[in-house]
Each structure stands twice: as C-alpha cells, then as structure tokens.
Image (cartoon, grey):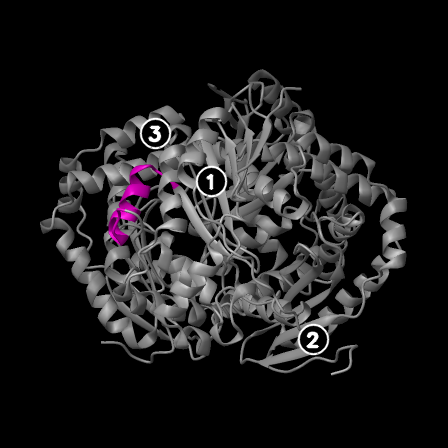
Amino acid sequence: MPETIHTHIFPNGLVLVAEQMPWLRSAAFSLLVPAGCAMEPTSRGGLANFTSEMVERGCGPRSSRQFILDLDNLGLEWNDFVSAAHAGFSGAAPAENLPAALAIFADVVRRPHLPEHELPAARSLMLQELRAMEDEPAQKVATELRRRHYHEPWGRPAHGDLPGVQATTLDDVRGFFARHYRPNGAILGVAGRFEFEALHDTVGALLADWPPAEPPQVAEQPARQPYLHIPYQSAQTQIGIAYDSVPYRHPDYFPAWGSVGVLSGGMSSRLFTEVREKRGLCYSVHAGHHTLRDRAGVFCHAGTSAERAQETLDVTLGELGRLAEGVFPDELARLKARIKSSLIMQQESSSARSGAVAGDWYHLGRVRTVEELHDLADRLSCEAINAYLAASPPGDFTIATMGPSPLEVPVAV
Amino acid sequence: MQFDKHYLPNGLEIVAECNPEAYSSAVGFFVRTGARDETDAESGVSHFLEHMMFKGTPTRSAEDVNREFDEIGAHYNACTNEESTIYYANVLPEYLDRAVGLLADIMRPSLREADFETEKQVILEEIHMYDDQPPFGADERCRAAYFGSHPLGRSVLGTVESITHLRVEVMRDYFARRYAPANIVLVGAGRVAFDHLVRLAEAHCGGWESRPVTRAMAPVEPRVPFVVIHKEIATQQYALLMSPAPFDDARQRYAAKLLATVLGDDSGSRLYWELVDPGLAEHAGMHHAEYADAGAMITFLCCAPEDAADNLLRVTELHRRAGQDAVTEAELQQAKNKVCSRVVLAGERPRGRLFAVGIDWVCRGEYRSVEDDLQAVGDVTLDDLDDLLRRYPLSPAATVTIGPLEELD
C-alpha cells in the first residue's frame, strides 16, 4: 500500500496533514484555527463568528471586493464556519488552483485589514442571521438543546446572541483576532490531487513564519437545565432530546456511535420505524452522535403537530429506553453495510476527506486511514455495543421543546 | 466514460454514463410525472405517491423494503417536483444488482389502504413543518402567481384539505395513468456495465405492461402580480421574484445560468455586493429554473421586514439595469470559472452525474458529458447575454412576499 497520508508539523506548531487522491481532478483544504466560540468572553456572544466575517473583508493586498473576485476567479467553492473550538475555512477547486487558494487564506488568517468601515455591515449580517434563525424552529430547538446539554462554553451557538452582537466593538474583534488566530493549535487538512513536496513547500512559504501565541485557558461551568420549553404559536411542536456519550478519542467511541446508528441510521433504524413508519407521528425524526474533543452527546429531534407531540416524545423516549436492552446482529450487519459504503464513497470527494483528516488530527493527533476505519468497522460486535449500552444506558436527558404548549417530561423541571 | 442507451419493447428507456474507474454505482428511475400532471382532485398525489412507493409490493412489506436498502448500505431516496419524480440509490458496485432489483420492485407497489392512511399523517406533518418555515411556502406561492392556470402553477405538496380528502382509489388511478414504462427512464452512472444494466432491466421491468402516456403542454402566459402574504409568526421578510427565461435552446440556457451567476450568485455577484455585503439582507440570490415547456429566472430575498420595501426596489432596479449596465468581460469570466468548477466537482461523484445525466435525458432527450458542459459554458459570449436580456427582460417579475408585514408598497 503506497503512503498516501502525509503529515508535517512546522516549528510554530501548525500541522499540515494531507491525503493524496490522485484519481480526482480536484483538491480541497480545510484550515482550522483555534478561534472558536468557546473562546469568546460571555458578554460577547458571537464574537468568533463576527471575527470570522471581518477577516474576509479585506486581507493582504486585497480589498474586500478583490478577495471575493480572486476566489471566484480560481473557481473555488469555499465556506467558512465556527464551532466551539475552531474558526474554519474550507475550499475545493480544480487541483491546479490549490496553491493560489491557500495563499489567499494565509492572508485571511494572518493579514486581515479588520477595517472600521466594514464593522456596521458585518454586524448587520450577524443580526440578520440571528433573526433568520427565529424562522427555523427545528434549528432553534437544536441550538437551545446543545446550549443546555454541554457545560458552558462548549454548547454555545456560533451565531451568538443579540446583546453580544450589538455590543461588539472593533477593538473586540481586533483583540480576539490577535489572541486566537495563531499557528499553534491550527490544522491544515488537504485532500485530492497534489504532490506532497510541492504542497509542503507552498504551505511552508505561506505559514511557517506565522508567530505562535499563548493558548488561552477556558473556564468551564456546569449549567444544565434539564427541561426548557419555548412558547411559539406554530402548527408543530419541535422536540429535542440529548444524553451523554463518549468522544471520538475514547476507546468506547465505536460501540457508542454504533448504538446511535442502530437508533437512527437508515430507514430501517428504530426511530424511523417506530415513530414514523408504524405510527405516522412525524415527517422528520432522527438522532445523531456529536463529538467535541473531551465530551460528546447524542442529540435527537422530532417535529410533529402539537396534539401528537406528547405521544411522539413518549415513543421516542421509549425507544431510548429499549436501546439500553441491546442491539441485534441483523441491525449490526446493516450498520456495517452503511459504514462501508460511506467510507468508500468518501473516496469520491476531496472536500469530505480534507475535513476528515483535519478533524482526525484534532481529535486523535493522527489520521485514521480509510483501511483502518474499515478494520474498526469490521471488528465492531454486538457484544461490544451491548456492553457499552449496559454500562452507559441512555438517560439523564436534557430536553427542549418549542410549540404552543409544554410537554410532560420525565425529568425534574 | 461511455454513454449508452437502449429501449425495452414495452417502452422503458435505459441510459447510462459508465465509468469503470468509479468507486460506486448510482442508479435511478426517473419518472416523467409531477404536480403538473395532476387534476384539482389529485393535488399533492405525485408527492404522496412517492412516499407510498416505499410501502411494499406483492412480495415485500414496507419494513422489508427499508431493511433491504439498508442491508446493501445504499444511500437512497426519492424526490418529487413539478414535472418529475425520481427514485435513486447509490451503492457499492457489488450491490448494483440488488439495488436495481429492489428499485424495480417498488416501482410496482401494492398501494394498500391501511398504509395509505398512516402515510397520510406523515404527509400532513410535512405540510405543517413547511408551514412553520416561512421561506418554504414562498416558492409554491410564487409559481402559482407566475404560471396562473398553467399546470406548472400547481402545488407539489398539496394542501391539508386536498391531502385529507384524497382517496386511495384516486392514487391508484394516477399511478396507472403515469407510471407506464414509456414514461420512465432507468438511469445509471459510475461503475455500471451497460449490457449488464440492460439485462437487469429486462429481468425486472420487461414484464411491465405497456400503456400510452400523454402530458398536457401549453404555452405559458406569464403573469406578474405583486402578492403580499401575511405570516404573523415569521421574523424575517422573504420575497421571491419570477420572470421568463429560456428552456429549450442550449446556448440560451447556458447564457441564462451565467447571467444568474453574474447577477445573483451566493457571493461575488451584483446582488451580493448590493445587498448582502453591506448587511442589508441576510440572503439574496438568483437562479435559472427550466421545465419541459418553460424557463424562469428566480430571485430570492430574505431581510428584516423594515428593510423589505427598499430592498425590493434595489432588486427591481438591478434587474432593470441589467440590460443597460452591460455585463463586463471580467464578470462573465468570473461566472464561467465558478460554474465550470462546480461542474467538475459535482462530476467527481456518480451521484452527481446520475442527476445531471438523468435530468438532461428526461427533460430534453439529450446526453451531455462533463466536457460538453464545460465547453458550452466556455462558449457563451457577452453578445449571448445581451441577446438573452433583450428576449427575456428580468423586469417586470411576478413577486410574492411572505412575512410579518401586512402590506408592502
């Protein structure tokens, strides 16, 4: 098997991790900078997102307009995002345009202008995003559920809050940039068609002299409120349920994650079968495993007419209770088939792999090859999943609902 | 990369773009039917039927269908729009035979009454869900406003009333009328051996009874009303604008896609600089939609209610100016770079190719490779854009706005 995954750690701490996929015409990158919303001061909810918006409003030799024009001329499909831990910048393009795209984003993370005259427009966009979120009830419930399930600051939403966005000043943005846009803790994942030596030289020239900075201390606060109802005069009630799980780096991760696959993977999964197919209670019902570096949760969602919401909640909680009794060999076989095809289909997308290699490095300090993942999937057994579920049954739920009236929930309110 | 086509004696068409190097195989049944083929009494039946197709056949229960798709690790789904209904699966090559067998079996469903009544509740929940998300209702309302009594003005989802009153016999009649083999194309992409696909189709679909199928086609008489829909629980104001665009001439269609990119792409477009970059709107964009007998240029806007009137004026002004304030060579080149890059990236996945090949074939009976698309995009000139704007001015446009405002001047 030829070596297709390369890593290099520059002296300033920046990690370059790259996977060659020479059968593709494209190349993609995912640059994670340790400037996520968990680093925001409590009074400045949304500052990480605000900063991420501002660094793109002019950088290096480019004005705000020239920045977009240059990216468009490379045909780069690009995106930015903010998670609890990172501000991320990703892109994919025909392979020959990768070095030029990296040069632009090196300017974004090192030499943004952060101009005063762009501040009102950036703020206005942040406020628009907050307002648009109000028209997406399912997303709003998911946001409130995560905020209550994880310890502060790990459950914060990237888009922040109204007072935080309104209070943010240019000094806040410049200060946040200066403290958190740093190479130590940053990861650049690349995947697709490239020569590693050339890539290494390109990245070195762009980022090797980026000076490191002191990592901040993040203070945690347990802030759990087990049930929240948001009154809303809608046709449907949105229901969110969360419980603890183990993170990607934990030895029990695959059994824990596999149990969620049985609960809500394909259309033969338990939630879909029991809640939608047999009872017709809702159109949308699903559960997903979400991992941070040191903690994780399972987040379930269902949306249904207000008068059927209580039954939907009860049936869903019943399925979570039944999960603790264990999973069956036929369910595991279907789960493995789905894992296998997802892994192989990832090989068709440079974007998917560039995100995966960067994420692996963040969680594990190394990259799992596709072969290793196949092997882990093959070795997953009912015994391992059931032992995990017996020791850590779904329970101690955090619940959030949004709709005309609250529901009866099995937790102390 | 090799394209092939074949007809079965009963009228079923089989087309595939075969790539022996691909990691996966994608296959789908594309049915030429959708909301436009419904009568008033059937409103919403195409989409409801799409759900019912997964509810079992004479030899499989609904649970069997879901379980078997999951056993082969398929990425599978279905979708319904105004004029087509698509059932597809993306699988590893070793499961292609089972995927085709399963998809073919569900194309001849039992449509049992008990399943129909249970699934009716799911459809009603889907309607309620979109009802709580104001931007989603707007596109159906805008098509209705623009197309008027033309079949393309029909709702895909139907209404709570039409779905509640729908009877299973009506669905069975619709199925018998629309799902004849001559109205269906089996499409393959990725690692698929064409001769083998044809043999699978013969084995699984050869016995389907042939029946004649027709579709009412009519010239569109675009209407340009201004409609305000008051939605009290909404926070933002949403607007959709619709104006005529080409649908049959290839050169004009690519010109329309490039014009939509210049004027209304998500970033770097005229709308972006005018509305999104300065923070006047949360989102503003444009795209070109094409149907069998009509095309449309669609503009979408989401902003704070208090800015909606000014923003709509800005959009209309930008539309009006598009002719005089000619597109520059640099703008055109920038749009070409973006569109070409998207074609290349989507073309790397069999799933992406399945939809591109299937829709080209079902809508226009033509095959276009990734290279053909790149070439066609590259060939568009500024004169083509001028010509397009002369034939298809963007203003006046049908306008539908939905949100907390009760009126809007």
Residue neighbourhood size for the residue with mark 3, other residues' Cα within 10 Å, grouped as few (<14), some (14–19), many (≥20):
some
Query: Please, is residue A326 above or below residue A312 in the view?
Result: above
User: What residue occupies the far left of the structure in this picture?
Assistant: B324
Q: Secondary structure at mark 3?
A: helix
Q: Magenta residues: mostly which secondary structure?
A: helix
Residue of label 2: A224
Name the chain under label 3.
Answer: B
Residue of label 1: B32
Residue neighbourhood size for the residue with mark 2, other residues' Cα within 10 Å, grouped as few (<14), some (14–19), many (≥20):
few
Residue of label 3: B373
Q: Nearer the viewer, residue A91 or B101?
A: A91
Residue contact between numbered discs 1 and 3, judged by CB atoms under 8 Å: no
The residue segment tinted magenta is A61-76
Query: Please, is residue B237 above or below residue B92 in the view?
Result: below
Q: Secondary structure at mark 1?
A: loop
Q: Is residue B183 left or right of residue A65?
A: right
The residue drawn where x is 12% and y is 49% is: B323
> Magenta span has A67?
yes
Instruction: Quadrant for residue A281, please give it.
Output: bottom right
Disc 3 residue type?
Asp
Tell which circle, 1 or 3, labels the residue nearer the N-terminal end: 1
Instruction: Quadrant for residue B209, please give it.
Output: top right
Tag nearer the camera, 1 or 3: 3
Q: How many marks are shown on the rendered structure?
A: 3
Q: Quadrant of the N terminus of chain A?
A: top right
State the CA–CA distance, disc 1 to disc 3.
23 Å
Tag nearer the camera, 2 or 1: 2
